[in-house]
Amino acid sequence: MKGVKTVSSGAVNRTIPQAEFQEGCRRHQQEATRNLHDMPSVVAGLWKTEGFATTLGKYRLPENTLNDPKIPRESYGITHVGYGAASTEHAHFDTKMLTEIVETLSEPNYRGFTYEGIGSILRIYEPGIFKFMCGVLGLIPKGAPPGPDKTGFFAGFYSAFPPNVRWLITHGYGRLVGFSKISVYKAFDEALTLPKEHIAPCVQGTAFAFAMMNSVEMARLLDKSAIPYEPYVRAAFQNGLVYGLIFCDWFVPGFLAKFHPAGKLSEQLLTKARDEAALSQKRGYPLPFHLENPVT
């Protein structure tokens, strides 16, 4: 509930001139840097920026684009996620329109983040208590169309995208599974009912959300992350937690510098996060929800 409300608080529910979008992204990012070593403060900035970007996707102006060098590069990942989610609603799940939006309005290195946002809307539009809650909080507009047919885990919808994009969409779906379950283990249990190729990205997305929601205890979560599941599930969970740290460090450079581990495993995963964050800076952009050297 807190996460959904924080995202909602960043939305302005009207068209946003491009100059205002540039400035709003800059403001949210700079606010987060005031407590750059406090993960809950960084997460709040990410969520507000996400909500702001969803507004851009819902209330469009011809001048609006994410491929704009005046938008802080630190905000690129989260703005593309929010924009991808809103674009899914705007396109009424039309895959051809969605692909055109992603390919023409995203910064090329961040297209994967836009595709990932699609999966969050797949989950939000599934009938159930979470859809009802999102409607009450204004994340689903009145009179919105139903989501796509879920037969074969959205097989018809997924068929329009290549495997790497399907992976990202499932990650976004898993992220919202994490938000819509009462415990992370309930989320894992649901992920394990999916077709085999969707389990790992769903679990990793859930782990990413779990890190954001419980960021105040992030060091302890890392240290207790050797969960009693199959190795590939455990690896996906740890990769999601590690990526959460990398994502925060990209949004607020220097975030990881004073992060303190809570034990041996926490220290190992923190080292991986710092190494991956350094690779992102060297590359000039973070990989969309992937690690260059993932936990296996």
Image: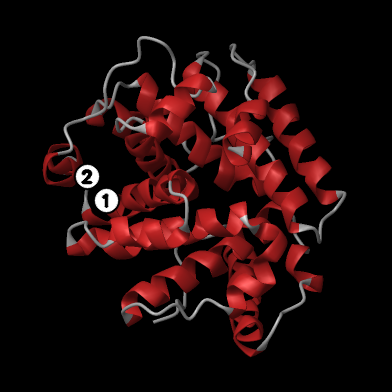
Q: Secondary structure at mark 1?
A: helix
| Label 2: how many Cα within 10 Å (few below 14, some 14–19, many 20+) | some
The reply to whether residue 284 is visible in this rendering is no
Q: Are marks 1 and 2 in contact (CB under 8 Å)?
A: yes
> At 47% across and 27% down in the image, what residue appears?
134
Q: Quadrant of residue 187?
A: bottom left
Q: Secondary structure at mark 2?
A: loop
Q: Position of residue 219 (x, y in %)?
A: 68, 72
Q: Quadrant of the N terminus?
A: top right
| Label 1: how many Cα within 10 Å (few below 14, some 14–19, many 20+) | many
Q: How many marks?
A: 2
> At 62% across and 32% down in the image, what residue appears?
5
Q: Position of residue 12 (x, y in %)?
A: 64, 18
Q: Which residue is mark 1?
A: 166
Of residue 238 and residue 33, the one placed in the foreground of this image is 238
Q: Which residue is mark 2?
A: 161
Q: Quadrant of the C terminus?
A: bottom left
Q: Position of residue 147 (x, y in %)?
A: 26, 27
**Residue furthest bottom in the image:** 264
For the residues marked 1 and 2, what is the alpha-carbon distance in whole angstroms?
6 Å
Residue 144 lies, with reference to residue 45, above or below; the image says: above
Query: Which kind of residue does numbered mark 1 sit on?
Result: Arg
Of residue 234 and residue 129, the one placed in the foreground of this image is 129
Q: Residue 219 has which mark?
A: none
Query: Which kind of residue does numbered mark 2 sit on?
Result: Phe
